[in-house]
Image: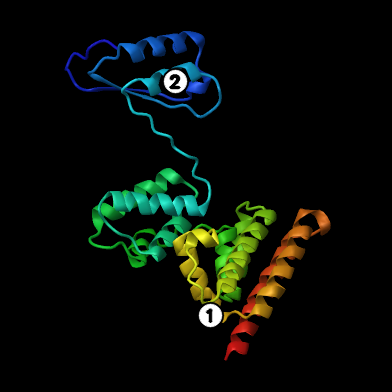
Amino acid sequence: MSPSLFGEPRLVYVPALEQMTDALLADLIAYVGDADPEVSVILRHNGGQRGKRLLDAIKASPYPTIQCDAIKSARDKSSLVTADVRRAGRSIAPEAVGALVDALGSDVRELCSAVDQLLADTQGTISVDHVRTYYAGRIEATGFTVADAAAVGNTPGAITALRHAVATGTDPVAIVAALAMKVRQLARVAAAGGRRMSPAELGMAPWQVDRARRELQGWSDDALASSILAVARADAEAKGASRDPVYAVERAVLTICRARGAGASRRR
């Protein structure tokens, strides 16, 4: 890390410390004890026991350590979006969080970049209209897209999304899992009834609870029960009980859409 000819700041990034050699381990432990104040060093460790001596040395030093938990679920991604917006001193509508995760959730880096762009280009609370203006047409055809359409009884939209998802490589088992999650969320919020249970108590993100409450306007208890049975059947068939898993999923989607419509009629 020799001095720069022009004296500009220097940054060294070392990824995958869990794969380091013994020589690098020894060098880094020595460097922690005598670091160059003109150089910023970022060390990334992805888990495991390899390099534990180095991690212990860093924790015992005055240098900061940050634990970054894996971001896997839609709930994790929505929490990330909300936290980034709040860190910037702004707010974002729950529906906007959901729309952003739906549009760009498969790539966390792109999701974070989208948040930065919205923060830079908009004023006040970031709304779902802002997200649609910037990212219209980016909604990914996944099992969650299918489930969202089915939950509101949008049969054409659900079937179109299903066929698009299958055509672009989404496994029928994953689509059934998304349907199951959606029906469970609806049932969970319905069971809460008038009790104002928190999202944490329901095991859901705030925007998921808000969406489920809106979607439940067209559902009855019988409709939810028939949908749960349809998803359970599709799950078994998609995992080998049927020769045509795509047809099994399509039948479940149609059952959910029809059940929702029947529930809406009953409530009238």
The percent coordinates of residue 53 (x first, y second) are 47, 16
* Crowd band around label 1 with a 10 angstrom C-alpha radius: few (<14), some (14–19), many (20+): some
Given the image, on which type of amino acid does mark 2 rest?
Answer: Asp
Residue placed most toward the observer, 163 or 132:
132
The answer to whether residue 98 is seen in the rendering is: yes
Q: Residue at x 61, y 59 (%)?
A: 178
Mark 1 or 2, nearer chain start? 2
**Position of the C terminus by quadrant:** bottom right
Q: Residue at x 56, y 26 (%)?
A: 48
Badge 1 is on which residue? Answer: 217
Given the image, on which type of amino acid does mark 1 rest?
Answer: Gln
Q: Residue at x 52, y 61 (%)?
A: 201
- Left or right? Give the position of 215 relative to 266: left
**Position of the N terminus by quadrant:** top left
The percent coordinates of residue 198 (x first, y second) are 47, 64
Q: Label 2: state its secondary structure.
A: helix
Badge 2 is on which residue? Answer: 56
Residue placed most toward the observer, 140 or 54:
54
The percent coordinates of residue 231 (x first, y second) are 71, 65
Q: Are marks 1 and 2 in contact (CB under 8 Å)?
A: no
Q: Label 1: state its secondary structure.
A: helix
Where is residue 153, by image quadrant? bottom right
* Crowd band around label 2 with a 10 angstrom C-alpha radius: few (<14), some (14–19), many (20+): few
- Left or right? Give the position of 180 relative to 89: right
